[in-house]
């Protein structure tokens, strides 16, 4: 059975402008993934800083792997100006993780 959890970004992050806040949000998302198949994260069309995006979404994608990230994480209401940033950090971190795994 697939369980879907709707997550309001405001419930896991008090701001979207720093790496420490991104780490905290990522840890909250990882905790939710332990008991849910899919997370739907609503960003309410807010802009997020590159450092937050990298730590929260990029590192989450690297940990899950791109196929699982795409299958288990749904990003809702992402600000149009933020979409290219999110795409960039997710793909970059997944590429780095794959390169590290291949080197081992």
Image: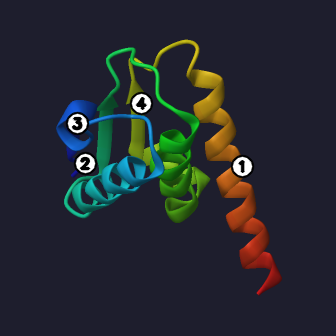
- Which dot, 1 or 4, sits closer to the camera? 1
Residue under circle 2? 2
The residue that appears at 32% across and 49% down in the rendered structure is: 25
In the depicted view, which residue is nearer to us: 15 or 96?
A: 15
Q: CA distance from mark 1 to mark 4?
A: 18 Å
State left or right for residue 42 relative to residue 57.
Answer: left
How many other residues sit within 10 Å of disc 2, few (<14), some (14-19) or many (≥20)? few
Give x and y (percent) for residue 66.
60, 52
The residue that appears at 41% across and 48% down in the rendered structure is: 22
| Dot placed on the residue nearer the N-terminal end, 3 or 4 | 3
Residue under circle 4? 75
How many other residues sit within 10 Å of disc 3, few (<14), some (14-19) or many (≥20)? some
Residue under circle 1? 92
Give the quarter of the image for residue 78: top left
- Which dot, 2 or 4, sits closer to the camera? 4
Q: CA distance from mark 2 to mark 3?
A: 16 Å
């Amino acid at each position: 059975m697939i369980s879907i959890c709707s997550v309001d970004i405001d419930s896991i992050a008090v701001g979207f402008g720093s790496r420490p806040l991104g780490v905290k949000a990522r840890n909250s998302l990882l905790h939710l993934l332990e008991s849910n198949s899919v997370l739907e994260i609503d960003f309410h069309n807010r802009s997020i800083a590159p450092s937050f995006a990298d730590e929260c979404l990029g590192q989450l994608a690297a940990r899950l792997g791109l196929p699982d990230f795409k299958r288990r994480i749904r990003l809702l209401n992402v600000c149009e100006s933020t979409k290219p940033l999110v795409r960039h950090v997710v793909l970059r971190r997944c590429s780095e993780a794959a390169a590290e795994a291949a080197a081992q």
